[in-house]
Image: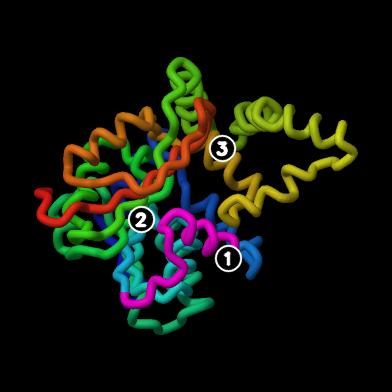
Amino acid sequence: MAETVDSTLIHEHQLEVSAGERFEFGANWERFLEQLDDQRIQVAEDSLNRLLGATDLRGKKFLDVGSGSGLFSLAARRLGASVHSLDYDPQSVACTSELRRRYFNGDPHWQVEQGSALDPAYLKSLGVFDVVYSWGVLHHTGSMWPALGNMVPLVRDGGQLAVAIYNDQGSASRRWTSVQRLYNRLPRGLRFIVLWPSLALLWARPMIKDFLSLRPFKTWREYHKNRGMSAWHDLVDWVGGYPREVAKPEEIFEFYKAHGFELVYLRTQAGSMGCNEFTFVRRPGSKA
């Protein structure tokens, strides 16, 4: 199965976008794929290795919840996993399918489909997986805590759950949510009013530091070394990424601890913006 889309989900997604209640993540990732190269793919693999503590996923079933550009589904497949990719955004589904076509055309061990992290019945139909991966996704569903809970039954006993969730910065997080809401409610031709000041705010300090170090734009040019991503497309994703929720690291830890998971990897933002990364292992015999 190369790609499966759901007409009902497509309609729901279009209504949310038209109402200014949802960012078109897939449109952003479609432009990112124009920059994708072997170096970025290798960086993505290294990032996945670090998060999962493994360099070989052969024989593993890997579920990518919110596959976005498809880059990390591709990384998992290259590491040997049997991959199932899903995303709510139809253009993200198309991006993931495009990477499957480019690198694993016709591969029966990589399935791509449209689906929602908020649909327990649909998720149950997928079965259980050795690795459930959802990086920077569940806080964009509009119902983060139910979405986090819906991941629990998908992980087999002894399996891994890797999630990344926006760090809760209190009032700063609330301000950014307001910025993202405004961005999505503006006509497309006026969104630069939000985007360019955000670029200046977020990048002024590293840009100045690079110039003073006589290495102009070094941080921007080397941004791809962070998970293989693009500075510009991550900026657009950050400014436009609505709906948006946040959580403190201890909240995520306690939530999954109560569901029978043990934390084995943690990378926080030390109080700053961005995503805290977590990898949990499901304790054998724990109840969903």
Residue at the spot 33% in from the left edge and 30% down from the top edge: 250
Asked whether 92 falls inside the magenta stretch, the response is no
Vertical arrangement, residue 54 with respect to residue 182, above or below: below
Vertical arrangement, residue 212 with respect to residue 112, above or below: above
Task: Return the residue at label 3.
Answer: 188
Q: Secondary structure at mark 2?
A: strand
Rendered image quadrant of residue 59: bottom left
Task: Return the residue at label 1.
Answer: 41
Q: CA distance from mark 2 to mark 1?
A: 17 Å
x, y percent for residue 159: 26, 60
Tag 3–tag 2 contact (CB < 8 Å): no
Q: Nearer the viewer, residue 128 or 146?
A: 128
Q: Secondary structure at mark 3?
A: helix
User: Outermost residue, right direction?
Assistant: 214
Q: Secondary structure at mark 1?
A: helix
Range covered by the magenta-colored residues: 41-59
Amino acid type, label 3: Arg
